[in-house]
Amino acid sequence: MRASLRLVVLPAAAAFWSACASGQARPPTPLTDPFAATKTYLEEQVAAGAFPGGVLVVGHRGQVVRSQAFGRYGADDPRPVADSTVYDLASLTKVVGLTSAVMLLVADGRLALEDSVQHHVPAFAGTPDKAAVELRHLLLHSAGLPAWRPLHLETPDAAQARALAYATPLDTPAGLRYTYSDLGAILLTAVVERAAGSSLDALLADRLFEPLGMSRTRFRPPPAWTAFIAPTERDPWRGRVLRGEVHDENAARLDGVSGHAGLFSTAGDLARFAFWLLDAWHGRLPAGAAPWLPQDLVREFTRRQDAPAGSSRALGWDTPSDGSSAGHCLSPGSFGHTGFTGTSIWVDPERELVVILLTNRVHPTRENRAILRVRPAVADLVVRAVAGEAACPADR
């Protein structure tokens, strides 16, 4: 058991790579490096135009065993990406931020999965069927809400955007259909903020990011960070290349803070988060640790739930399925998520394995969809590197 969550091994990993740079230590040669194939593959994908660059971090049994930056910042910024480069996480916000906030509030006794959404957000009204929507439905994307609507075009400010999201009619009664819904995450953000009595960004900073030492994770990054943030799309709505501004238009209309998108972070910070979750999943969080979650709660949130047909969802999280970003070889009990900008995180509790891939594949345009084949390939390469070819045969 690690004595403190603040002592996850990222500082040790950083010291190792610093020693490499100074000549005091040498990284493994390609002949002995189990991640040689992963390194080559990512470099090939940069050359093929899948993304300008990115960072891969692999954690295994509580240690960072691989931290690899590859490629450049962007089309007009040829600087090489660094391990510390900040990325727009897009929908990873849903799990790193929003789902974690729900877990913390459930552990506090301030929320329950069976709570009526209307109890917390009375403005979620207009039709009788909304009374049946529970928090569990929002986490499972089975509330009956549409996937999306252009709040950024339909409303002039954050207050009216939220009001329109709450007023949106259901497409189907709750629990009947799986539809991945940003509107549901926006609604759940309101539930969290009212239960917590604070904004989502303040809650997460105080209860999660600061205790875990995630100093490069936040909504609305300050101007001082801009040079170290990977750019995203040349956005036609805003008329410029986005850098340090949230890529998601609806999150931008919500002033950059929402549970569906808006977080910026580094791969190293996300490794701290993933190690914390693994410790909680295995019941290793010491008494009095901050943040603390009970083991049974974390396991409930990260297991595949009984959900409508076509769903592979846990509560907030996703689980491996045919054709998913998890690849073919992560354990069935793994959980993870992706982000539209080219980000992903997968956690395999059985192997105590973490795979974090951050890219800016939407730069300069979201039409680049090569990330869909890259993510599962990287996951399989990582399993082979950590567990051996027998754990993930190349012909699988």
Image (cartoon, rainbow, N blue to C red):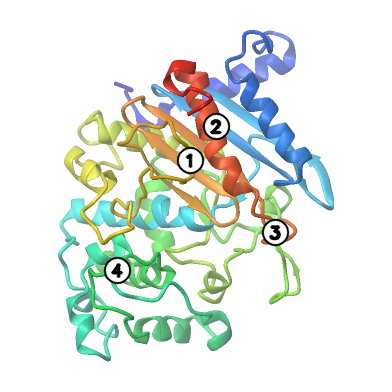
Q: Nearer the viewer, residue 230 or 383?
A: 383
* Contact flag, marks 2 and 1 (Cβ < 8 Å): yes
Residue at (39% x, 63% y) in the render: 200
Q: Is residue 368 visible?
A: yes
* Contact flag, marks 2 and 4 (Cβ < 8 Å): no
Q: Earlier in the sequence, mark 4 or mark 1?
A: 4
Judge from the rendering whether residue 180 lies leftward or rightward of residue 106; answer left or right. Answer: right
Q: Earlier in the sequence, mark 2 or mark 1?
A: 2
Q: Amino acid at mark 1?
A: Leu
Q: Which residue is mark 4?
A: 177
Which of the numbered marks, if any, corresponds to residue 270?
Answer: 1
Q: Residues within 10 Å of mark 4 (few under 14, many from 20)?
A: many
Q: Residues within 10 Å of mark 3 (few under 14, many from 20)?
A: many
Which of the numbered marks, if any, corresponds to residue 243?
Answer: 3
Q: In the rendering, at what x and y percent does residue 314 appear?
A: 29, 50
Q: Secondary structure at mark 3?
A: loop
Between disc 4 and disc 1, the foreground one is 4
Between disc 2 and disc 1, the foreground one is 2
Judge from the rendering whether residue 247 lies leftward or rightward of residue 101; answer left or right. Answer: right
Which of the numbered marks, if any, corresponds to residue 240?
Answer: none
Q: Earlier in the sequence, mark 2 or mark 3?
A: 2
Q: In the rendering, at what x and y percent does residue 247 appear?
A: 61, 64
Q: Is residue 156 visible?
A: no
Q: In the rendering, at what x and y percent does residue 108 appear?
A: 19, 53
Q: Amino acid at mark 2?
A: Val
Q: Nearer the viewer, residue 176 or 238?
A: 176
Q: CA distance from mark 1 to mark 3?
A: 20 Å
Farthest residue in the bottom direction? 126
